[in-house]
Amino acid sequence: MTLTWLEERIARAHECRGICISTIVLRMMIGFAFIPAGLKKLLGQPFTDPANTGVFHEFLHAFHATGRFYQFVGVLQLTAAVLLITQRHATLGAALAAPILVAIFVFCWSTGVVPTAIVVTLMSLGLLALILWDIQRWKALLGTTAPAPPTAHPVVNMRLWSRCGWLILLLYFVNTAITGQVYRPMGVEWSNPSFIVLLIIAVLPVVTFVLDSPPAKD
């Protein structure tokens, strides 16, 4: 009964433009959070300063020293990020991100890095919401129900949002290739071109929202 009630509420939410756009943006935010971490691992760069000490940092030092495994996790993070940000296979992206995020969640709380652990907890809650959002797809995958029919009149233009996601990825990856650095802002840095690129990336969903706005009715 509880699951049926939840499914009904989620089905109604799928018909609400505002909630759909919020879900799209949430996918982008969680996916984008994986990009710097995934790129650093793929490029073999340490995730923390080698001079840092403590259980949290010592684990990351040892993790970096594993080499290929370190890069493999980076590939998984980047794959999940691309799937989430581009929207096309966001359900698969959420499934791939879930075990990664759970591992990070347990690691951060067990090593006592509270600020980071709080951020990861919020990300985990957001990812849980994304998984619940696709509950009908999960049930269909498990064979417990028939696939839900496509919406006759989609409330958002998913093709437009997908292009926005690809543009976000293109800008960040090109900036990384040009600068040779995986940029993570440490504050307001108006003199840093990478910071400007990040601002442009942040504005893109707003521009897409405007372009996807339904025409005004006479």
Image: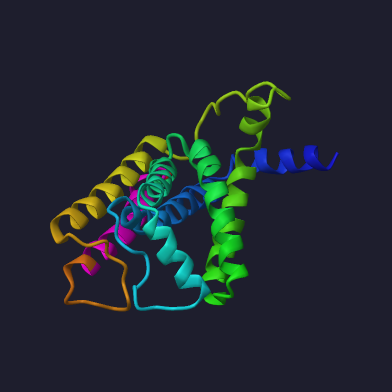
Magenta: main secondary structure: helix
For the point 42% across and 35% down, the residue is 88
Query: Residue lying furthest left in this view?
Result: 178
Q: Does residue 134 appear to the left or right of 191 in the view shown?
A: right
Is residue 24 in sight in this rendering? yes
Query: Residue lying furthest right in this view?
Result: 1
Q: Position of residue 182 (x, y in %)?
A: 27, 61
**Image quarter in which the C terminus is found:** top left
Please tell me whether residue 214 is drawn above or below residue 186 in the rendered image. Answer: above
Q: Position of residue 53 (x, y in %)?
A: 44, 78
Please tell me whether residue 89 is drawn above or below residue 50 in the rendered image. Answer: above
Part of the protein shown in magenta? 195-215
Nearest the viewer among 3 and 46 is 46
Nearest the viewer among 146 and 210 is 146
Q: Does residue 179 appear to the left or right of 12 in the view shown?
A: left
For the point 57% across and 51% down, the residue is 127
Q: Does residue 99 appear to the left or right of 44 in the view shown?
A: right
Render colour scheme: rainbow
Please tell me whether residue 135 is drawn above or below residue 189 in the rendered image. Answer: above
Q: Is residue 49 magenta?
A: no
Q: Position of residue 130 (x, y in %)?
A: 57, 47
**Image quarter in which the N terminus is found:** top right
Please tell me whether residue 122 is drawn above or below residue 192 in the rendered image. Answer: above
Q: Is residue 208 magenta?
A: yes
Count of picture labels: 0
Q: Position of residue 159 (x, y in %)?
A: 37, 35
For the point 38% across and 41% down, the residue is 86
For the point 32% across and 53% down, the residue is 39
Please identify the quarter of the rendering in which residue 185 is found.
bottom left
Is residue 218 in sight in this rendering? no
